[in-house]
Every structure is written in structure tokens, then in C-alpha cells.
Image (cartoon, rainbow, N blue to C red):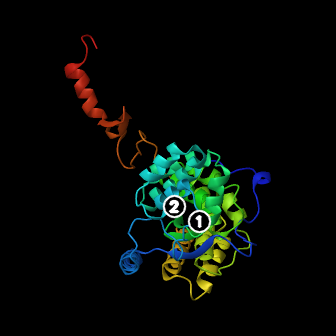
Amino acid sequence: MSEPSAPGVRGAIFGDTRDITPFRNGHVRTSVGGLADGLSSAIWGVLTGKTAGRIDVAGDAPRLKRLSGKTVKLVYDAVFTSTEPDRLLTLARTYPGWAGLCYVIAGLLVYKHGGYLRASELLQRGLSIRIDDAASQFSSSYLRRVVTRIEVAERIDVAVLFSEESVFLALSHCFRETGQTTEALDILASLPPSLPSALARCTAAAALERHADVVAWTEGLRNTDDLSAALLLIRAQSLRMLGEREAAQAALAEVLRRKKTSLALRNDALTDRALSKLEVRRRPNPRPPIPRGVVRRKPGKSKDAELEAIDGIRKDVEVRRMWNKDFGEPGG
């Protein structure tokens, strides 16, 4: 894909100026770390009495108000006690004013279980349906503690509280997993600047070979945590693709500057730096390739013994002469 024109390139998109954001801790996933996280989550579920597979909540689930109506109780139970989205989907069909909210929560639950195609369908359907005032009040009262751990870049997970950003980032990841990279990039265009959204956008843009956008979006980035270090790695790769090797080396040096950077990210930076140096030292082949069908003439041989290319097959001139004498056409 060709690079976009310069006027269409925006500035940096990683600077979150809000005092309160929906993002919690980021995590660099490794094979060993993933096993440990899964085991600790299972142990925590046993100790706290929480059923595995339910939607995640930061802390304890909010208490249901005594005077809540029947619909509120049904939706509350479907959100906080169910491990399957079917109850939410049934409620979406039964109560049209709650359908958009039920589809979105069902999509996040399916996303948690790794069903990216179905999750993308449910999330898109939920976003397309307007909810009524009762559903909106339920969302603000009970869903603020719902948290979704979303993969915003390769091996980088971020916990995001229920919000527009959690839904859009989860949908973007679903699009990436199902091969809809352009849609994965477009769905994030309206989100406010932040490191998690910048990671997701640059991951999709780099896959689409929009390296000029990646460089513009990460201009001035410093290594302040593992999320920024991961974003610097994407920036360095795009700079290399654009032929700006010195700037790419500077980005990798910034990753290595902070000593507390994740060991996995530091190893990636060291590997990329070594590969870049090898590319600079590699010499091109001084002998141009020989076009197919062309035979080089070897010195010291007579003209009758030379080889020539006929239909890509080398044949000796003397052998051809004998063939024509014995098997040639009559009168030839």
C-alpha cells in the first residue's frame, strides 16, 4: 500500500492529558508469564468464590439497589453471575431499549473467552443500537467497575474500565485477529490520545505499511514505561522501512535507556539493533544476475563447439547437425 500524502498525516497521538483515564496497568505477556497469570487467576477465583469465565470486575461487584426494577435485576444477574452471553442476548430481544447495552456486554464477554469473530459481530451490533434512559442509568451505576483486558499490540495487554475506549479497542483487536486491518485502524480514529490507543493504531498502521503515519504519530516519544517502550519499537521498525536508519537506532537506544524496561522489550530492541547493523554492512552482489536463456561464451573453444540456447535448453551444435542429417525432413 502506498504511503499517504503529507497533508493527511496527523501529529502525535500518545499524549493523554486527562487526570482520570479508563486505563489500568499494562502488561508485557511472555510464555512463562502467561502461565503464571492463568494459575494466579484460577487460585484467586477459588479463594474469592468467583466463578471462572465471568466478566472481570475491578474489586467487588457493585451491590444491587433494593428498589431496582425487574429488568434491572435480570440484566444485573446476566452481567455479573453468568459465564455465557446467551442470557444477555435473550434480554436484548426481550427488552429493545436495553438491546444495545446487552449486545456490547455480551461481546466483551465473548472477547474475554477469545471468540474474536463473534465478539466483533456482537460489539458492532450493540454500537449500532441506541439505548434508552434506564439502560444508560444502569451503565453509569453498575458497569463502571467492569474491566476488560485488551491486547493493544503484540504481547501487550492493557486493563481498561468499561468505556467507549474499552469497546473500541476490543473491537479493533477483533478486527486485527480476523484479518480486517483497515477496519481495525479506522475504528480507533475518534478515540482521545493515549498510549494504549496509540499502540493499537500504530500496530494496525504498520501492518498496512503506513509507516509515515506511524513516525508522525510517535514523534517526540520517550521511554517512560513498558507501553511507551513497546511503541518505540514499532516506531523504530517503521523508520527502518522508510530508510531512516539513524533515527531508528535512536528509537532503539531510547528503549534501552530505561533500565527497568521489560526484559522482553529490551531483548527485542537489541535484536532489532543487531539486524539493522547487519543490513548496513551487507554488500550487494557485484555480479548482476544472468538473464534466463542467455548462455555465456567460454573462451578457448572453437565456434562449432559453442553452446546456444534454444527454448531454454542448451544443445551442442554438432549434435544438432547429426540429428538433422539422420532425421531431418526429406530433401532437407
Vertical side of 258 occupied by 328: above or below: above
Residue 272: % across, % down: 53, 73
Residue 282: % across, % down: 52, 68
The quadrant the C terminus occupies is top left
As drawn, the label of residue 49 is none
Q: How many marks?
A: 2
Q: Is residue 308 left or right of residue 60?
A: left
For disc 1, the marked residue is: 142
| Residue under the image location 47 percent in, 61 percent down | 77
**Does the residue at mark 2 contact the one at mark 1 (Cβ under 8 Å)?**
yes
The amino acid sitting under disc 1 is Tyr
As drawn, the label of residue 76 is 2
- Nearer-the-camera pick, 202 or 187: 187
- Nearer-the-camera pick, 173 or 9: 173
Among all residues in the image, which is located at the extreme left? 326
Among all residues in the image, which is located at the extreme right? 7
Residue 95: % across, % down: 55, 45
| Residue under the image location 48 percent in, 64 percent down | 80
Among all residues in the image, which is located at the extreme front? 67
- Nearer-the-camera pick, 332 or 96: 96
Choose the circle earlier in sequence order: 2 or 1.
2
Q: How far apart are the two marked residues, 2 and 1, measured between alpha carbons? A: 8 Å
Q: Is residue 132 left or right of residue 45?
A: right
Location of residue 248 by image quarter = bottom right
Among all residues in the image, which is located at the extreme bottom? 259
Element carrying mark 2: helix
| Residue under the image location 62 percent in, 71 percent down | 23
Element carrying mark 1: helix
The amino acid sitting under disc 2 is Tyr
Label 2 Cα neighbours within 10 Å, binned few <14 / some 14-19 / many ≥20: many
Residue 201: % across, % down: 63, 60
Vertical side of 192 occupied by 28: above or below: below
